[in-house]
Structures are given as structure tokens and as C-alpha cells.
Image (spheres, helix red, strand yellow):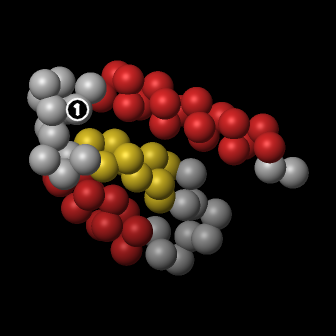
């Protein structure tokens, strides 16, 4: 799994990676995108908090799956 994190530019990167690795079934592209935020706009979206919650949820999912 590869996680792409960021703003609208990151969404384009994620789409490109999906296309580039379409023939690689073992690689899944996951995203955490907020289109209008930018990584430095903490007045709009607090990325450290968002990523901490995202990571915690991902860890919980991984622990609960067989």
C-alpha cells in the first residue's frame, strides 16, 4: 500500500500512480486528500491532527482484519 497525502496536486499524483501501477495488483494506492488546503494552510485544515486520526484509523483497521 502507498498512501498519497496532500492537496489537489496530490490527487493528480494519486491518479497517475493508479494508472502507472494498474498492472501491479499487490500495490494499492490510498489517499488522504483535501483539495483546497495545501499542507501549510493550518487555518483551513490541521494536517498534523488529520494525519494522526487517519493513521490511528488505519492501525485499527489493520488490527481488526484477519
Q: Nearer the viewer, residue 66 or 53?
A: 53
Instruction: From the viewer's perspective, tell me whether residue 13 is left or right of residue 63.
Output: left
Q: Position of residue 48 (x, y in %)?
A: 34, 22
Q: Residues within 10 Å of mark 1 (few under 14, many from 20)?
A: some
Q: Position of residue 46 (x, y in %)?
A: 27, 26
- How many marks the image carries: the answer is 1
Residue named by callout 1: 45
Above or below 49: residue 32:
below
Above or below 4: residue 17:
below
The quadrant where residue 6 appears: top left
In the image as oriented, which residue stretches furthest toward the front?
44
At 31% from the left edge and 67% from the top edge, which residue is drawn? 15
At 38% from the left edge and 23% from the top edge, which residue is drawn? 49
Above or below 34: residue 23:
below
Instruction: From the viewer's perspective, tell me whether residue 17 is left or right of residue 10.
Output: right
The quadrant where residue 41 appears: top left
Residue 35 appearing in the image: yes
Residue 40 appearing in the image: no
At 15% from the left edge and 32% from the top edge, which residue is drawn? 44
Q: Nearer the viewer, residue 50 or 3?
A: 50
Q: Nearer the viewer, residue 40 or 27?
A: 40
Q: Position of residue 16 (x, y in %)?
A: 30, 67
Identify the secondary structure beneath mark 1: loop
At 72% from the left edge and 42% from the top edge, which residue is drawn? 62
Q: Position of residue 3 (x, y in %)?
A: 45, 47
In the image as oriented, which residue stretches furthest toward the right?
66
Amino acid at each position: 500500500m502507498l498512501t498519497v497525502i496532500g492537496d489537489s496536486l496530490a490527487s493528480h499524483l494519486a491518479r497517475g500512480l493508479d494508472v502507472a501501477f494498474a498492472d501491479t495488483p499487490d500495490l494499492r494506492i490510498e489517499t488522504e486528500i483535501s483539495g483546497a488546503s495545501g499542507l501549510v494552510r493550518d487555518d483551513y485544515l490541521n494536517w498534523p491532527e488529520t494525519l494522526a486520526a487517519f493513521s490511528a484509523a488505519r492501525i485499527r483497521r489493520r488490527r481488526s482484519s484477519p
